[in-house]
């Protein structure tokens, strides 16, 4: 008869953490983290600028510290990943503070993306490119979570099937479903054209139309805009999109469309500077040159009128 094998195992409490330890591991807590242990969020769409607002924030942090803790999550390879608080981290560095108070929270990748986007959309100043990239990241995260992401549903379908992800995304920032869709379309623009949108040189609706052009056609248009020092109207971009979808958009067509006079467009008269520079002292401001020329023309016109009256 086989002997009963006895194995002396340590108590379960010695093998596993206590319930209190397990609860403590999951509990959110705020601690001062060294700045070098806080890593930026991957592909963070919001720019952290060294501007006057940042200098003011740094001065405030220097005097009072960071009043609102940042939000971080642990990284698998050590340290922490910033979810919300990139500007506060930069201000802390400028204020020569080695640490920053942070709330540590265990988050999945998609949960972190959604929180990161929502927290930054509350800022007053957001560039179109920032909002476009942020909306796209959040939409993709929601898609991975299994939420609806139909971009083409009608308003009637919305009421029947419930809110779609674009409408949910817009609620946190006050944008409509259609507006969210337009912003996401901007991510299809080549970087140089997207920069023109940020600079206010191209409005939203024309930019959305241009987003449907392939990158090579956008590049051709960009070269035309630079050469002619003008941007297309909404109507002109609609024409370009139509020609592109028909396979008929090329350099000549783009040039022809760009030469069309836009509504309310005021024709500008240009004169090479070297032809008039001899009449002005070096360094004379352009506005002063223009004012002087206009005044000279007014005097010339008055003289011609007096001559005709004789």
Image (cartoon, rainbow, N blue to C red):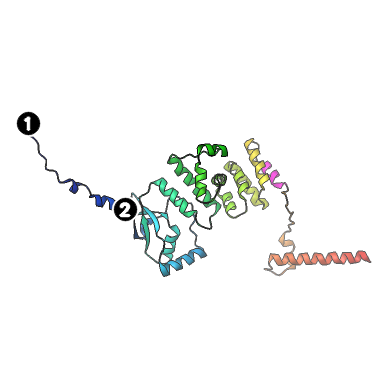
Q: Which residue is mark 2?
A: 27
Q: Quadrant of residue 88?
A: bottom left
Q: Is residue 69 above or below residue 45?
A: below
Q: Is residue 154 visible?
A: no
Residue span colored magenta? 252-260
Task: Name the residue: 74% across, 62% down.
Answer: 275
Is the magenta region chiefly helix, strand or loop?
helix
Q: Furthest residue to the front?
A: 160
x and y percentages locating residue 38 in the rendered image: 38, 56
> Observer-nearest residue: 219 or 200?
200
In the image: residue 71, left or right of residue 302: left
| Badge nearest the viewer, 1 or 2 | 2
In the image: residue 83, left or right of residue 255: left
Q: Is residue 65 visible?
A: yes
Q: Is residue 224 above or below residue 158?
A: below
The stretch drawn in magenta includes residue 276 = no
> Observer-nearest residue: 187 or 172?
172
x and y percentages locating residue 202 in the rendered image: 62, 51
Give the number of the disc on residue 2. 1
Give the number of the disc on residue 145. none
Task: Name the residue: 87% across, 67% down.
Answer: 303
x and y percentages locating residue 49 in the rendered image: 50, 60
Q: Residues within 10 Å of mark 1 (few under 14, many from 20)?
A: few
Between the C-alphas of marks 1 and 2, the distance is 49 Å
Q: Furthest residue to the top?
A: 1
In the image: residue 308, left or right of residue 39: right
Q: Is the Cβ of the residue at disc 1 closer than 8 Å to that at disc 2?
A: no
> Observer-nearest residue: 280 or 141?
141
x and y percentages locating residue 239 in the rendered image: 67, 41
Q: Is residue 293 above or below residue 208?
A: below
């Amino acid at each position: 008869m086989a002997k009963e094998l006895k194995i002396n195992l340590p108590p379960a409490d010695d093998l596993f953490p206590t319930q209190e330890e397990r609860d403590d591991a999951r509990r959110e807590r705020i601690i001062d983290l060294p700045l070098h242990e806080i890593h930026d969020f991957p592909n963070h769409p919001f720019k952290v600028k060294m501007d006057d607002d940042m200098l003011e924030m740094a001065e405030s942090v220097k005097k009072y510290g960071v009043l609102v803790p940042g939000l971080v999550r642990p990284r698998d390879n050590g340290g922490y990943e910033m979810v919300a608080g990139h500007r506060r981290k930069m201000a802390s560095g400028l204020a020569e503070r080695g640490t920053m108070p942070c709330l540590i929270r265990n988050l999945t990748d998609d949960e972190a993306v959604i929180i990161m986007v929502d927290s930054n959309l509350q800022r007053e100043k957001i560039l179109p490119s920032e909002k476009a990239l942020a909306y796209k990241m959040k939409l993709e995260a929601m898609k991975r979570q299994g939420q609806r992401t139909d971009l083409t549903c009608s308003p009637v379908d919305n009421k029947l099937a419930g809110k779609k992800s674009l409408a949910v995304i817009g609620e946190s920032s006050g944008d409509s479903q259609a507006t969210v869709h337009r912003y996401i379309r901007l991510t299809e623009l080549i970087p140089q054209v997207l920069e023109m949108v940020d600079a206010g040189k191209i409005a939203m609706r024309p930019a959305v139309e241009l987003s449907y052009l392939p990158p090579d056609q956008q590049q051709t248009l960009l070269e035309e805009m630079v050469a002619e020092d003008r941007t297309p109207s909404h109507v002109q971009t609609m024409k370009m999109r139509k020609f592109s979808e028909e396979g008929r958009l090329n350099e000549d067509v783009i040039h022809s469309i760009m030469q069309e006079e836009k509504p309310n467009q005021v024709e500008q008269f240009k004169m090479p500077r070297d032809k008039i520079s001899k009449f002005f002292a070096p360094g004379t401001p352009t506005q002063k040159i223009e004012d002087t020329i206009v005044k000279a023309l007014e005097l010339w016109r008055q003289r011609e009128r007096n001559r005709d009256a004789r």
